[in-house]
Image (cartoon, rainbow, N blue to C red):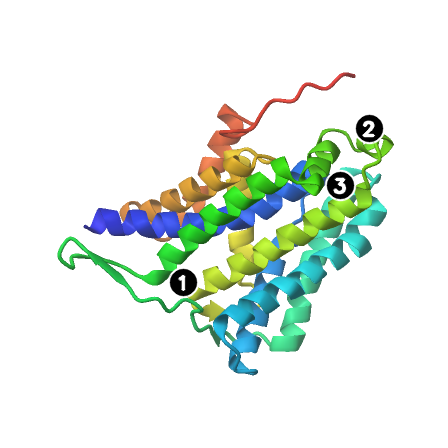
């Protein structure tokens, strides 16, 4: 039963990583940018949900919607102000800008909400499930988190394959210049990509703080880095790869902390990334792309 409990916790944590990694992989796959401020958008979403429930007294589902709206607008603003002017700049300039935006969001959160940790009330209140005559207790957070992850991945897959905007995203991902010549609005497509990724970050932030109810300005930093690791592990640019990488990484982290060392749990996660980059740099489901020079 202990093994199953660890497995369920690993899948739950991995599902949060997967939702965050989906935002990373969409932005990189379409705009070819690494948005390292993505983890701090997670933090903003969690704070917005916290304020809506604690200060305004509104229901939990409204707090999630409010967090998604605010983070969507924030994602669009970040893309327009910080990344759009650097669209043709060297990748190092974009990377430095992303790190700077991350620090800007963290320090803005410090000014607005202070550095004092806040107790986050779970937005999930469905009751627990008992299996095997009550020997295995599954709380509602893991169940909702896994279901959200599955629904989001299926919705994104259908969106990118069936809708007009989704097809535009795939065209921009293949070749921005050719897509623009074919009438695709590249700027709008990239903005929509950032908006979707930021909305997913808001959902992930709420789910993360529901499971680990301590909220502070650095809340999204480490999960954001681990989710980026999950995106690379699964194959950055691949939606199924982001989900697979996130879940596997969550399981590896939980089992590493349980059976090897609590202190070395994070190190084990990044060791997996190093091994993957050495053995299969494209990730589990990533595809090798040949470029003509």
Q: Earlier in the sequence, mark 2 or mark 1?
A: 2
Element at label 1: helix
| Nearer mark to the viewer, of 2 and 3 | 2
State the residue at coordinates (67%, 57%).
Answer: 102
Tell me if residue 94 comes above or below residue 62 in the rendering: above
Q: Which residue is denoted by mark 3 in the rendering?
A: 92
Q: Is residue 179 visible?
A: yes
State the residue at coordinates (68%, 70%).
Answer: 108
Q: Position of residue 143 (x, y in %)?
A: 36, 55
Q: Position of residue 59 (x, y in %)?
A: 50, 76
Q: Label 2 to label 1, Cα distance in Å? A: 44 Å
Element at label 2: helix
Q: Quadrant of the C terminus?
A: top right
Q: Badge 1: how crowded within 10 Å, few (<14), some, or many (20+)?
A: many
Q: Earlier in the sequence, mark 1 or mark 3?
A: 3
Circle on res. 178: 2
Element at label 3: helix
Instruction: Name which quarter of the figure residue 91 lies in.
Output: top right
| Nearer mark to the viewer, of 1 and 3 | 1
Q: Which residue is denoted by mark 1 in the rendering?
A: 211
Instruction: Name which quarter of the figure residue 63 lies in.
Output: bottom right
Q: Label 2 to label 3, Cα distance in Å? A: 25 Å
- Choose between 147 and 106: the one closer to the eye: 147
- Choose between 120 and 163: the one closer to the eye: 163
Circle on res. 172: none
Q: Position of residue 144 (x, y in %)?
A: 40, 57
State the residue at coordinates (15%, 53%).
Answer: 132
Q: Badge 3: how crowded within 10 Å, few (<14), some, or many (20+)?
A: few
State the residue at coordinates (28%, 63%).
Answer: 128
């Amino acid at each position: 039963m202990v093994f199953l409990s660890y497995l369920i916790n690993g899948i739950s944590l991995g599902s949060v990583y997967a939702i965050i990694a989906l935002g990373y992989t969409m932005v990189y796959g379409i705009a070819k940018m690494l948005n390292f401020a993505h983890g701090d958008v997670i933090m903003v979403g969690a704070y917005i949900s916290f304020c809506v429930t604690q200060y305004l007294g509104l229901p939990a589902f409204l707090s999630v919607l409010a967090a998604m709206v605010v983070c969507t607008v924030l994602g669009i603003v970040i893309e327009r102000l910080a990344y759009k002017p650097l669209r043709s700049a060297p990748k190092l300039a974009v990377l430095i800008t992303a790190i700077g935006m991350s620090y800007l969001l963290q320090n803005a959160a410090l000014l607005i909400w202070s550095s004092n940790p806040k107790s986050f009330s779970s937005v999930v209140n469905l009751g627990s499930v008992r299996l095997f005559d009550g020997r295995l207790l599954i709380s509602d957070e893991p169940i909702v988190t896994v279901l959200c992850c599955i629904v989001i991945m299926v919705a994104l897959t259908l969106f990118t394959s069936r809708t007009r905007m989704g097809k535009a995203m795939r065209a921009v991902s293949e070749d921005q210049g050719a897509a623009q010549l074919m009438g695709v609005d590249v700027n709008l497509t990239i903005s929509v990509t950032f908006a979707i990724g930021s909305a997913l970050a808001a959902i992930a932030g709420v789910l993360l703080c529901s499971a680990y109810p301590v909220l502070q300005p650095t809340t999204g930093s480490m999960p954001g880095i681990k989710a980026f690791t999950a995106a690379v592990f699964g194959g950055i640019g691949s939606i199924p790869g982001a989900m697979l990488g996130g879940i596997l990484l969550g399981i590896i982290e939980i089992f590493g902390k349980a059976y090897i060392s609590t202190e070395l749990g994070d190190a084990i996660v990044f060791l997996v990334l190093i091994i993957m980059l050495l053995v299969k740099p494209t990730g589990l489901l990533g595809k090798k792309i040949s470029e003509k020079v």
